[in-house]
Protein backbone atom coordinates (compact mmCIF):
# COMPACT_ATOMS: atom_id res chain seq x y z
CA UNK A 1 0.00 0.00 0.00
CA UNK A 2 1.31 3.41 -0.99
CA UNK A 3 1.01 5.56 2.12
CA UNK A 4 1.27 9.33 1.86
CA UNK A 5 1.19 9.85 5.59
CA UNK A 6 1.14 6.76 7.83
CA UNK A 7 -1.95 6.58 10.00
CA UNK A 8 -3.88 9.15 7.98
CA UNK A 9 -4.67 7.88 4.51
CA UNK A 10 -3.13 6.22 1.47
CA UNK A 11 -2.07 8.27 -1.52
CA UNK A 12 -4.83 6.68 -3.59
CA UNK A 13 -7.47 7.57 -1.01
CA UNK A 14 -6.27 11.18 -0.87
CA UNK A 15 -6.21 11.41 -4.67
CA UNK A 16 -9.76 10.04 -4.87
CA UNK A 17 -10.83 12.60 -2.25
CA UNK A 18 -9.14 15.39 -4.21
CA UNK A 19 -11.08 14.25 -7.27
CA UNK A 20 -14.35 14.71 -5.33
CA UNK A 21 -15.24 11.13 -4.32
CA UNK A 22 -17.43 11.69 -1.22
CA UNK A 23 -16.68 8.32 0.39
CA UNK A 24 -12.95 8.99 0.06
CA UNK A 25 -13.34 12.50 1.46
CA UNK A 26 -15.25 11.10 4.43
CA UNK A 27 -12.57 8.44 4.99
CA UNK A 28 -9.77 11.03 4.88
CA UNK A 29 -11.59 13.33 7.31
CA UNK A 30 -12.30 10.41 9.66
CA UNK A 31 -8.66 9.30 9.54
CA UNK A 32 -7.40 12.81 10.21
CA UNK A 33 -9.65 13.53 13.21
CA UNK A 34 -7.50 12.12 16.03
CA UNK A 35 -4.32 13.69 14.64
CA UNK A 36 -5.94 17.08 14.15
CA UNK A 37 -7.52 16.96 17.62
CA UNK A 38 -4.19 16.08 19.28
CA UNK A 39 -2.45 18.94 17.50
CA UNK A 40 -5.21 21.40 18.47
CA UNK A 41 -4.94 20.35 22.12
CA UNK A 42 -1.28 21.38 22.11
CA UNK A 43 -1.87 24.73 20.44
CA UNK A 44 -5.18 26.08 21.67
CA UNK A 45 -5.86 27.88 24.90
CA UNK A 46 -8.55 25.61 26.25
CA UNK A 47 -10.02 22.17 25.60
CA UNK A 48 -13.14 23.81 24.14
CA UNK A 49 -11.07 25.95 21.76
CA UNK A 50 -9.13 22.83 20.76
CA UNK A 51 -12.31 20.95 19.94
CA UNK A 52 -13.73 23.90 18.02
CA UNK A 53 -10.48 24.43 16.09
CA UNK A 54 -10.25 20.73 15.24
CA UNK A 55 -13.84 20.70 14.01
CA UNK A 56 -13.28 23.81 11.92
CA UNK A 57 -10.12 22.31 10.41
CA UNK A 58 -11.98 19.11 9.51
CA UNK A 59 -14.76 21.13 7.88
CA UNK A 60 -12.15 22.98 5.82
CA UNK A 61 -10.55 19.64 4.90
CA UNK A 62 -13.92 18.29 3.80
CA UNK A 63 -14.74 21.35 1.71
CA UNK A 64 -11.33 22.14 0.25
CA UNK A 65 -9.40 18.88 -0.11
CA UNK A 66 -9.48 19.44 -3.85
CA UNK A 67 -7.17 22.43 -3.39
CA UNK A 68 -4.48 20.31 -1.67
CA UNK A 69 -1.52 20.40 -4.06
CA UNK A 70 0.42 17.30 -2.99
CA UNK A 71 -0.98 14.18 -1.34
CA UNK A 72 2.07 14.01 0.97
CA UNK A 73 1.32 17.49 2.30
CA UNK A 74 -1.95 16.54 4.02
CA UNK A 75 -0.54 16.55 7.55
CA UNK A 76 1.32 19.85 7.23
CA UNK A 77 -1.70 21.45 5.52
CA UNK A 78 -4.02 20.33 8.33
CA UNK A 79 -1.62 21.43 11.05
CA UNK A 80 -1.35 24.87 9.41
CA UNK A 81 -5.15 25.14 9.35
CA UNK A 82 -5.38 24.14 13.04
CA UNK A 83 -2.63 26.57 14.03
CA UNK A 84 -4.34 29.40 12.18
CA UNK A 85 -7.70 28.54 13.73
CA UNK A 86 -6.20 28.50 17.25
CA UNK A 87 -4.55 31.88 16.59
CA UNK A 88 -7.80 33.28 15.20
CA UNK A 89 -9.66 32.20 18.34
CA UNK A 90 -7.00 33.72 20.59
CA UNK A 91 -7.18 36.98 18.64
CA UNK A 92 -10.98 37.06 18.85
CA UNK A 93 -10.78 36.64 22.61
CA UNK A 94 -8.11 39.35 22.81
CA UNK A 95 -10.19 41.70 20.64
CA UNK A 96 -13.32 41.15 22.76
CA UNK A 97 -11.28 41.72 25.92
CA UNK A 98 -9.76 44.91 24.52
CA UNK A 99 -13.13 46.27 23.33
CA UNK A 100 -14.64 45.66 26.76
CA UNK A 101 -11.69 47.11 28.66
CA UNK A 102 -9.98 49.84 26.69
CA UNK A 103 -12.42 51.26 24.18
CA UNK A 104 -11.43 52.44 20.73
CA UNK A 105 -7.86 53.01 19.65
CA UNK A 106 -6.97 56.70 19.52
CA UNK A 107 -5.02 56.44 16.26
CA UNK A 108 -3.99 54.02 13.55
CA UNK A 109 -0.49 53.95 15.09
CA UNK A 110 -1.90 52.98 18.49
CA UNK A 111 -3.93 50.21 16.85
CA UNK A 112 -0.85 48.81 15.09
CA UNK A 113 1.16 48.94 18.31
CA UNK A 114 -1.66 47.28 20.27
CA UNK A 115 -1.90 44.47 17.72
CA UNK A 116 1.87 44.02 17.70
CA UNK A 117 1.92 43.82 21.49
CA UNK A 118 -0.97 41.32 21.47
CA UNK A 119 0.91 39.16 18.97
CA UNK A 120 4.04 39.25 21.15
CA UNK A 121 2.00 38.16 24.17
CA UNK A 122 0.34 35.39 22.13
CA UNK A 123 3.75 34.21 20.89
CA UNK A 124 5.17 34.18 24.44
CA UNK A 125 2.18 32.11 25.60
CA UNK A 126 2.50 29.69 22.65
CA UNK A 127 6.14 29.06 23.60
CA UNK A 128 5.26 27.94 27.13
CA UNK A 129 5.37 24.24 28.01
CA UNK A 130 1.94 22.62 27.57
CA UNK A 131 0.86 22.54 31.24
CA UNK A 132 2.06 26.07 31.93
CA UNK A 133 0.29 27.37 28.83
CA UNK A 134 -2.99 25.73 29.78
CA UNK A 135 -2.81 26.90 33.40
CA UNK A 136 -2.00 30.49 32.38
CA UNK A 137 -4.76 30.69 29.79
CA UNK A 138 -7.41 29.06 31.95
CA UNK A 139 -6.53 31.14 35.00
CA UNK A 140 -5.47 34.55 33.64
CA UNK A 141 -7.12 34.75 30.24
CA UNK A 142 -10.37 32.86 30.76
CA UNK A 143 -10.61 33.75 34.45
CA UNK A 144 -11.38 30.27 35.78
CA UNK A 145 -11.04 29.81 39.55
CA UNK A 146 -7.80 28.14 40.64
CA UNK A 147 -9.57 25.07 41.98
CA UNK A 148 -11.35 24.51 38.66
CA UNK A 149 -8.09 24.88 36.72
CA UNK A 150 -6.35 22.39 38.99
CA UNK A 151 -9.21 19.87 38.75
CA UNK A 152 -9.55 20.22 34.97
CA UNK A 153 -5.83 19.63 34.42
CA UNK A 154 -5.51 16.92 37.08
CA UNK A 155 -3.14 18.94 39.26
CA UNK A 156 -3.03 19.62 42.97
CA UNK A 157 -3.79 23.22 43.88
CA UNK A 158 -0.15 23.74 44.88
CA UNK A 159 1.10 22.32 41.57
CA UNK A 160 -1.32 24.54 39.65
CA UNK A 161 -0.09 27.64 41.52
CA UNK A 162 3.52 26.66 40.87
CA UNK A 163 2.87 26.17 37.14
CA UNK A 164 1.01 29.50 37.00
CA UNK A 165 3.88 31.32 38.70
CA UNK A 166 6.40 29.75 36.28
CA UNK A 167 4.22 30.61 33.28
CA UNK A 168 3.81 34.23 34.33
CA UNK A 169 7.55 34.55 34.95
CA UNK A 170 8.44 33.05 31.56
CA UNK A 171 5.98 35.30 29.72
CA UNK A 172 7.29 38.35 31.57
CA UNK A 173 10.90 37.44 30.74
CA UNK A 174 10.00 36.76 27.12
CA UNK A 175 8.23 40.10 26.79
CA UNK A 176 11.07 41.96 28.52
CA UNK A 177 13.47 40.37 26.03
CA UNK A 178 11.24 41.38 23.10
CA UNK A 179 10.90 45.01 24.16
CA UNK A 180 14.63 45.37 24.85
CA UNK A 181 15.65 43.81 21.52
CA UNK A 182 16.73 46.09 18.67
CA UNK A 183 13.79 46.58 16.35
CA UNK A 184 11.37 45.39 19.05
CA UNK A 185 8.20 47.28 19.82
CA UNK A 186 8.44 50.57 21.65
CA UNK A 187 8.54 50.34 25.42
CA UNK A 188 4.93 51.04 26.43
CA UNK A 189 5.49 50.65 30.16
CA UNK A 190 6.11 47.73 32.45
CA UNK A 191 4.06 44.56 32.13
CA UNK A 192 1.91 43.55 35.07
CA UNK A 193 1.04 40.13 36.38
Image: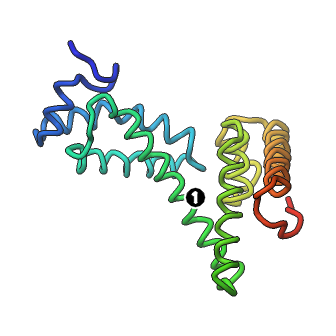
Q: Residue furthest front?
A: 182
Rendered-image quadrant of the N terminus: top left
Give the colour scheme of this rendering.
Answer: rainbow
Q: Residue furthest right?
A: 190
Q: Is residue 150 visible?
A: yes
Rendered-image quadrant of the C terminus: bottom right
On screen, residue 118 versus residue 43, left or right, reads right
Which residue shows up at 82% across the image and 52% down it?
A: 181
**Residue 112 lies in what quarter of the image?**
bottom right
Given residues 86 and 5, the one toward you in this image is 5
Crowdedness near tag 1: few (<14), some (14–19) or many (≥20) residues, C-alpha within 10 Å: many
Q: Is residue 148 above or below residue 163?
A: below
How many numbered marks are there?
Answer: 1
Q: Residue furthest top?
A: 1
Question: Residue 73, position in %: x, y?
Answer: 34, 33
Which residue shows up at 54% across the image and 66% down it?
A: 92
Q: Is residue 116 above or below residue 56?
A: below
Q: Is residue 148 visible?
A: no
Given residues 83 and 59, the one toward you in this image is 83
Considering the numbered disc 1 on the image, is that residue within a helix, a strand or a loop? helix
Which residue shows up at 21% across the image and 31% down it?
A: 14
On screen, residue 31 versus residue 96, left or right, reads left
On screen, residue 90 versus residue 175, left or right, reads left
Question: Residue 91, position in %: x, y?
Answer: 57, 63
Check disc 1 and report the residue beneath it: 90
Question: Residue 20, position in %: x, y?
Answer: 12, 42
Q: Is residue 154 above or below residue 106?
A: above
Question: Residue 125, position in %: x, y?
Answer: 69, 48
Which residue shows up at 20% across the image and 44% down it?
A: 66
Amino acid sequence: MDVADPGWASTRLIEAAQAGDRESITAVVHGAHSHVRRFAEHLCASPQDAEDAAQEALIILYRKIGSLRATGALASWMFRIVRNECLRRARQFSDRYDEAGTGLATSAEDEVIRRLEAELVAQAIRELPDVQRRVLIMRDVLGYPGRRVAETLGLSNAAMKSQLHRARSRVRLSLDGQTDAPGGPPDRGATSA
